[in-house]
Amino acid sequence: MAWRWEYDPDEEHVIGGAAPAFVAEAGKRADELVRAASSPRPRPLRLPASTPPVFKSDSLLADARALWKSLGDEAFVRLLPAATTAQPVAGDGLAPISATPAPAVGGDALPYA
């Protein structure tokens, strides 16, 4: 049994009044869909991925830098948690940061209280 349309509209009924450039582009897209559907080996489906943590951390650092510049050194440092109050979160896969300041690299290192 072959599949067929229950009605077969003519070309004028389908594209009547459409600009020729639009009709040509729609034809190209339809041809692409037909080629993709008839491909013997379709591409694997790409599922949407979450934002990688490195980009999230870059965004957090940019927000912190903007806050630091808007508040100034003293007010920003007062907002930072004390080293003794930080509690590690079980299972987060992160090692605790030591209380020893890292050497400054460049001019945008945050000051320590």
Image (cartoon, grey):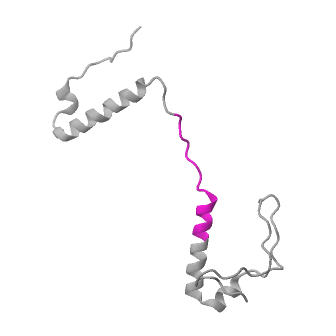
> Which of the 4 image quadrants contains residue 75?
bottom right
Name the quadrant of the C terminus. Answer: bottom right
Q: Position of residue 87 (x, y in %)?
A: 82, 71
Q: Position of residue 96 (x, y in %)?
A: 80, 70
- Seen in the image, is 29 located left or right of residue 11? right
For the residue pair 12 and 68, the one nearer the viewer reads as 68
Magenta region:
44-60
Is-magenta flag for residue 49?
yes
Q: Position of residue 9 (x, y in %)?
A: 23, 23
Is-magenta flag for residue 51?
yes
Whether residue 70 is situated above or below residue 58 in the rendered picture: below
Q: Residue at x 78, y 82 (%)?
A: 82
Q: Position of residue 37 (x, y in %)?
A: 42, 26
Q: Residue at x 15, y 37 (%)?
A: 17
Whether residue 28 is situated above or below residue 3 in the rendered picture: below
Whether residue 64 is situated above or below residue 9 in the rendered picture: below
Q: Residue at x 71, y 81 (%)?
A: 80
Q: Residue at x 84, y 79 (%)?
A: 84
Name the quadrant of the N terminus. Answer: top left
Q: Residue furthest bottom?
A: 74
